[in-house]
Amino acid sequence: MKEYYLKLVDPKRDKVLSNKISKMLKKSTEEFKASKGGHIPDWIVKKIIHKYYTSKESIKKTFKDTGYRFALMKKNKPIATILISKSINTIFAINSKNLNAKQKDYPNAYPKGYHCAINLVTDIKIRKKGLAKILLKKIYEEYSPLLKGKGIWMRADPPYHDAYVKLGFKHRTKYDVFLPKDVELPKTFSSTKEFNKKYICNCKRNKKQKEFSKTRRYKYSIFTLEFPKR
């Protein structure tokens, strides 16, 4: 693990590094596209995800004041990254039109007492090397004084449920998100039922969610990861 080091990125000063992180994020989310076997219509990836969540502007401007951008580095190259909110009251995105929202305005929608986190990504060329786990471990070891909450919470896209579980996250099913009935399906699926059959996990759900799963496409799993006791 000595070959890796952690960097707290300053978007104003670390412009070259910020650009490299944006490039890594975009490459990783390319696989979301339905045309590449993913679970999201291509236009949403291009016009929403890449514009609002992985762009250079999102790193340098949108989230620079509300979040800590961490990068796991190897020989001056970012190989993993995550964005963690400075305040436990910050929600980075309700949707692309409502960024840097306040959790107090959505009191029952997300786990309380946790820092919001997004953009947990490793370099697509060197996945399955435990880099995300190393990144999270180093953040707590080196920057825990910055993080006063109980841990972090994250939204996970449907295909990545098992990956988060392996990282030690707990699936908080009562907060999971389902889309409205009329939302467009990826072209690779003929029905909401087919999509949900492939992606909904076997975790225990309440009655309302079970009903949603019959008619509404599954959008996000909500996970929490506890920080070690101080």
Image: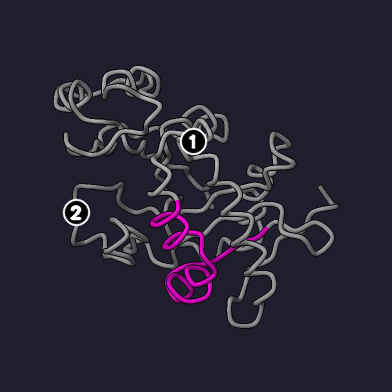
Q: Position of residue 30 (x, y in %)?
A: 54, 45
User: Which label number is shown at residue 35?
Assistant: 1
Q: Is residue 125 magenta?
A: no
Q: Position of residue 36 (x, y in %)?
A: 53, 35
SS label for mark 2: loop
Q: Earlier in the sequence, mark 2 or mark 1?
A: 1
* Mark 2 and mark 1: Cα distance apart in space: 37 Å
| Type of colouring | one colour
What crowding class fits label 1: few (fewer than 14 Cα within 10 Å), some (14-19), or many (20 or more)? some
Against 173, is 12 above or below? below
Tell me the residue at 58%/54% (across/down): 25
Residue 153 relative to residue 206: left or right: right
What are the residue bounds of the magenta stretch? Answer: 46-71
User: Which label number is shown at residue 107?
Assistant: 2
Residue 7 relative to residue 213: left or right: right
Against 94, is 99 above or below? below
Closest to the observer, 19 or 133: 19
